[in-house]
Amino acid sequence: MNRITACATAALTAVLSAPVLAYEEGSFILRGGMATVAPDTSSSALYVGGAKQDGTGVDVDDGSALGLTGVYMFRDHWGLELVAATPFTHEIQAEGLGETFELGETKHLPPTLLVQWYPMDTQSAIQPYIGLGVNYTAFFDEEISSTANAVFETLGATDDAKLSLDNSFGLAAEAGIDFAFGADQRWLFNMSVFWMDIDTDATVKVPGVGNVTAKVDIDPLVYMAGLGYRF
């Protein structure tokens, strides 16, 4: 019994005295979780064949995907973060042209690089942080809906339309917080929110009608919650 008690005491002492991994120079942090891109969309009026159509515009729905971030602490309290994700899918609506209808959908990837500041003591188990950096958004797999093709047919379209969105480069900012847990506090529960400056020129090529164009400011908030691990 004494031997069992001694072993248990030694194990407990080892756990309690385990070094807390710190937010110090040379450490790495990986985080992953569900991310939702919530656009704050504003757009110009639609131009059909170069002619402005008053009372028209474009709206973009929310999209969710797996978000991934990696951080290298290049100094105590300071990190360099790369944000990645699996592709986000967004439904796009056109407003006006006689009705509001589903224009189509697009996918995008938003690689983002930020410099982060962690103001708390490097050993703290609760770590809020802020970051500032740049975002590059690549749009791909754009598709026009059958509803949109039907609307364009009433305007004189002779074939199916094609949608394209220009890629975007802009500023990005974030705020987040880590809650460490586990014996050595390697594991983290993380919540974060990003703002990204995403602007694009949308073009729909409509055979027999001409191009339908609009300038679209997407400028989303991106909400992410998940787990992290410190090395």
Image (cartoon, rainbow, N blue to C red):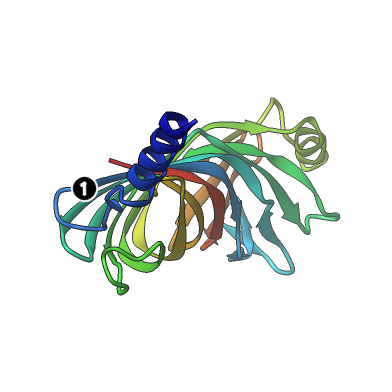
In this image, 141 relative to 28: left or right? right
Q: Residue at x 39, y 33 (%)?
A: 7
Q: Residue furthest top?
A: 159
Mark 1: which amino acid? Ser
Q: Is residue 11 above or below residue 136?
A: above
At which x and y percent is residue 163?
A: 58, 37
Q: 159 and 29: which one is in front?
A: 29
Query: Would residue 165 be visible to someone looking at this image?
Result: no
**Which corner quadrant of the image does residue 88 belong to?**
top right
Q: 62 and 199: which one is in front?
A: 62
Q: 42 and 6: which one is in front?
A: 6
Q: How many marks?
A: 1
Label 1 crowd (10 A; few <14 / some 14-19 / many >=20)? some
The residue pinned by badge 1 equals 27
Query: Would residue 146 be visible to someone looking at this image?
Result: yes
Assign the C terminus to one quadrant of the image. top left
At which x and y percent is residue 52?
A: 62, 63
